[in-house]
Amino acid sequence: MTKIAQLLNVRIPCTCGKDHFVPIRDVDFEFQEEKIGSIIKKHIEGEILLIVADKHTESFNHSVFHQIQKAGYQAELVEFEDKKLIPDEKAVGRVLMATDRNISGIVAIGSGTVNDINRLVGDRIKVPVVTIATAPSMDGYAASGSSMMVQGVKKTIKNSTVSGIYAKMDVVRNCPYDLIQAGFGDIIGKKTALADWVLSRELTGEYWCDQTVSYVEESTQKCIDNKDQIARREEQGIRDLTEALVLSGIAMAMVDDTRPASGSEHLVSHYLVMKAIEKGQLPPSHGRTVGIGTLISVILYEFLFDHATFQKQEKSEELKEKIKTYLPKKEEVIDWLTTLELSTHPKDYDVDEDLMEELIHKAGFIRDRYTIFTYLNELGLIDECAAYVKKYFYK
């Protein structure tokens, strides 16, 4: 937490040539419901609040809401009842419709989707948002962008960061296990995200920041080293995971871009979410599909490095070594996923051979970001690569 505290609400000169500033005022993982009144006073001027949550933490929601009312605030509670809440126009509209025209601020109680929706709404109506995290499921708590579905397409919409992030470890540690799996899947995806960033830096001259990379890499490695504690829900392991997710979001906010934490593995996840919604199905877990996306991305790099076309490129060996600074081995990713009881086969994420073929060809185009998908297309290797990946998984 010391490192996180040092990065908040202060201008940080950097060797990358930019001054970084993260306008989050406070991060505290020792939240208690009875403290909510004093917490709100730190961040929100005024008495009219909207509290937004989902039913998965109903008892905790009402405990916090009761303390907010007890502290003298005029508050309304909106609880989403969806089995799988989708961050789309409908969800945003529901929050906006519940917003008093004289609203002072928003308190979001929940994890990924609740946070994305409320950060976007708070930005648009220009009021501060305080987040009370309920699961270590994703890295967006501190981010300056919301991952949204817009007319069926997954997009990251830039907005303000929240003003404060709080968590009660007993609540976070006892969340459904699939949310812990999701957070771990999201974290290991930072490995391929950084590999993709190196690829783009070397081939396109894209901006790079050593400082933010070090924050992401160190916190990611700490979670990998403590994966057994995370799998057993031990408090220190879950605290490490939660801190790593928040620090990844801070890294994104520092450069005002998701690049430090999102690459080809996230494109895989986004594509699978979009396809499920297109078919009228419940979307798969973002973090869990980032996990399998990480394995797929590593296999893409494995194919690339072994191909004669790549080996003939100028300085290909030097490029490979720079990428491998961050890129894990396939066997390592399989071990990480297995430790958290996450499947290492796409079929368990409803990805058959045909969808895998489609994914390899199309996922790289859903976002304007240079990744391994982009490079494989540039080299004319995408068809061969799709066949290689299918042979690996569907022999």
Image: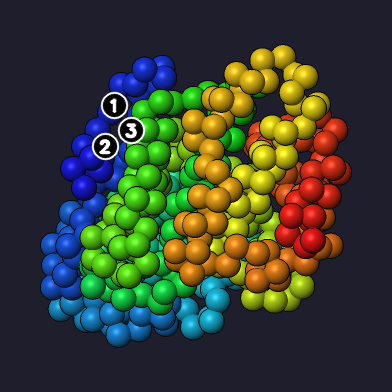
Q: Which residue is mark 1?
A: 12
Image spot of residue 313 (x, y percent) = 75, 19
The reply to whether callout 1 and callout 2 are in contact (CB within 8 Å) is yes
Dot 3 corresponds to which residue? 21
Numbered marks: total: 3
Whole-number angstrom distance, CA of label 1 to CA of label 2: 8 Å
Label 2 crowding class (10 Å Cα cut-off): few <14, some 14-19, many 20+? many
Is the C-beta separation of discs 3 and 1 under 8 Å?
yes
Residue at 41% from the left image edge and 19% from the top image edge:
16
Amino acid type at image mark 2: Leu
**Which labelled disc corresponds to residue 183?**
none
Q: CA distance from mark 3 to mark 2?
A: 8 Å
Q: Residue at x 52, y 67 (%)?
A: 342
Please state if 109 lies on the left or on the right of 363 as rendered.
left
- The 10 Å Cα crowd at callout 3, few under 14, some 14 to 19, many 20 or more, is some
Relative placement, left or right, of 335 versus 241 is right
Task: Tell me which amino acid carries mark 1.
Answer: Ile
Residue 43's x, y, as percent?
23, 54
Q: How far from the left and from the top, in percent, is residue 56?
A: 41, 80
Above or below, 332 relative to 289:
above
Q: Which residue is mark 2?
A: 7
